[in-house]
Image: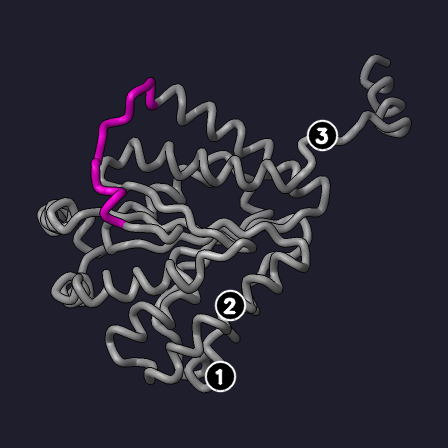
Amino acid sequence: MTIRLSDYEAGAKYDGDYKADLAALQKRLQRIQVAHIVHGARAIVMLEGWDAAGKGGILQRLTARWDPRHFRLHAVAAPSDEERARHFLWRFWRDLPPTGSIALFDRSWYGRVLVERVEGFASECEWRRGYDEINAFEAQQVAAGTTLVKLFVHVTQEEQDQRLRARIDHPWKRWKTGADDFHNRSRRADYLHAMAEMFARTDTAEASWIAIDGNNKKAARIAALTAIAERLEAAVSMQPPPMTDDLAKLRTQLED
């Protein structure tokens, strides 16, 4: 059953103690990261969504209690000349996580079938071929033992407009908005069409999509962090490292 973004527009307020629930989730996620470190697991968490949908806020809260030595955040922008001279997936192979690490992607390889398709940066032959190439790429990561979590954060046009206005009006947030945001906004119908096909073609058994209603920021953050925690937790042993004989001996020295 494919994802319909119109099902994720309620924008209901978060019904709970946001601060307490967020803190509990971040503690849970901290232990999940430690489990990846000590058990040598790998994971990819990838976020797609509209401009001003709240992806950055989700990632900020996701990593609040993580050890920065064991995760990497990749903010995906337009490809460089070097990257355009190669297959579109080349630059993402370079950023795959090593053992004991989690890679985070703020936007991703789905640019091939979204912005590159809509804006004409890829030919029709290229972006149509992209679905199979993306599915194969993701299946390879999963087959190699990497957990893959794919989220799409959705907001309505009205909510996006309100957030863009707020960014422009706030002197310390203006840097986050530019002409590209408004160009993409003007082609929303084209992007919605491309997104619908993206979900239909790439929501696979190996790498399913999770849609997040981003119209209420607090509710979206809790929903996104919960979904990420559940996916990561299910794929790694949550047993802490045991007390070894060597550690026990070291512990006794502290009593001397």
Residue plotted at (44% across, 39% down): 62
Relative depth, front residue between 183 and 177 = 183
The crowding category of the residue bearing disc 1, from other C-alpha atoms within 10 Å (few below 14, some 14 to 19, many at least 20), is: few
Query: Which residue in the rendered view is the most extreme toward the top?
Result: 255
Numbered range of the magenta stretch: 5-18
Q: Is residue 7 magenta?
A: yes
Relative depth, front residue between 25 and 209 = 209
**What number is the disc on residue 92?**
2
Q: Is residue 172 at all visible to an observer of this figure?
A: no
How far is the residue under mark 1 from the one under mark 3?
42 Å
Q: Which residue is mark 1?
A: 86
Q: Earlier in the sequence, mark 2 or mark 1?
A: 1
- Picture quarter containing residue 241? top right
Identify whether 212 is placed above or below 14. Answer: below
Q: Earlier in the sequence, mark 3 or mark 2?
A: 2
Report the predominant secondary structure element of the magenta stretch. loop
238 to the left or right of 13: right
- Picture quarter containing residue 119? bottom left
State which quarter of the image contains the C terminus.
top right
Q: Amino acid at mark 1?
A: Arg
